[in-house]
Image: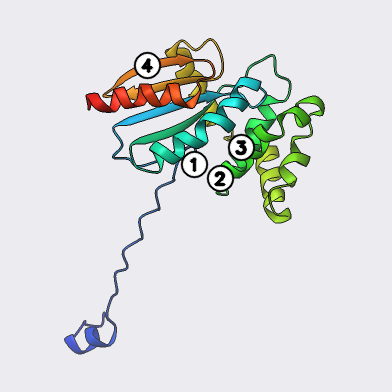
């Protein structure tokens, strides 16, 4: 015999429908600045490239302070490890693994700052160990060793570099209204500033 569901019974056993929470959007740790910015500057670098080091340490801090932080420009880092650089790929893996833990900028900055040291002996791990906590370092090591998707963004960056006709690092690609303008080599900030101001004036 099947029991009939009465209103009284229904009150005793209410059915609660729980709406599943939407997964949080994964933030691109290599992208910074306001999505409303009309200009995006994509920066192709190789961690062992001396000119990339100069760009990263001399030009980008001013670019970030004067344009990215003020919502005028978005900045996108792109990896373009050069085949002649023995340790560039492992350095890239460490930086991108750190990015998954929210420490991309810290590690990328450390790699460029100490380029002359680790590029001689390949001790990327020891270099990174100086700026991250031991627990985080172990997580980074695990990702570097085991994450088969860690190079996915590098593959994407290299594919875009080929479309952009890249032939050296560093290279900046200024994107404004869908148009991509390539600037090869190290660019002093004041020259870049003049160019950005011209582009902003058109918008």
Q: Is residue 167 above or below residue 104?
A: above
Q: Are marks 2 and 1 in contact (CB under 8 Å)?
A: yes
Q: Check disc 1 and report its element: helix, strand or loop.
A: loop
Q: Please report whichever mark, 3 or 4, sits nearer to the chain's N-terminal start.
A: 3
Q: Quadrant of the N terminus?
A: bottom left
Q: Nearer the viewer, residue 135 or 186?
A: 186
Is 104 left or right of 184, judged from the image as shown?
right
The image's mark for residue 29 is: 1
Q: Nearer the viewer, residue 86 or 111?
A: 111
Across and down, in percent, residue 130 comes to 74, 47
Is 75 left or right of 20, judged from the image as shown?
right
Is 2 left or right of 48, judged from the image as shown?
left
Q: Are marks 1 and 4 in contact (CB under 8 Å)?
A: no
Q: Check disc 4 and report its element: helix, strand or loop.
A: strand
Q: Report the mark closest to the observer, 1 or 4.
A: 4
Residue at 39%, 41% (x, y): give it.
33
Q: Quadrant of residue 79?
A: top right
Q: Which residue is mark 3?
A: 108
Q: Report the mark closest to the observer, 4 or 2.
A: 4
Q: Which residue is mark 4?
A: 181
């Amino acid at each position: 015999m099947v029991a009939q569901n009465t209103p009284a019974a229904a009150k005793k056993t209410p059915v609660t429908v729980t709406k599943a929470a939407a997964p949080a959007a994964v933030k691109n740790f290599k992208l910074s600045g306001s999505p409303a910015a009309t200009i995006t500057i994509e920066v192709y670098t190789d961690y062992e490239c001396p000119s990339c080091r100069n760009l990263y340490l001399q030009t980008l801090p001013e670019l970030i302070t004067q344009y990215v932080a003020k919502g005028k420009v978005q900045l996108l880092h792109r990896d373009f490890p050069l085949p002649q650089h023995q340790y560039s790929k492992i350095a890239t893996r460490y930086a991108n693994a750190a990015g998954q833990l929210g420490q991309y900028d810290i590690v990328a900055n450390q790699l460029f700052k100490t380029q002359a040291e680790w590029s001689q002996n390949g001790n990327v791990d020891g270099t990174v160990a100086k700026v991250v906590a031991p627990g985080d370092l172990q997580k980074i090591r695990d990702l570097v060793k085991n994450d088969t998707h860690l190079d996915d963004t590098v593959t994407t960056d290299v594919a875009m570099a080929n479309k952009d006709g890249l032939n050296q690092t560093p290279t900046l690609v200024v994107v404004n209204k869908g148009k991509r303008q390539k600037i090869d080599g190290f660019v002093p900030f004041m020259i870049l500033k003049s160019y950005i101001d011209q582009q902003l004036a058109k918008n």
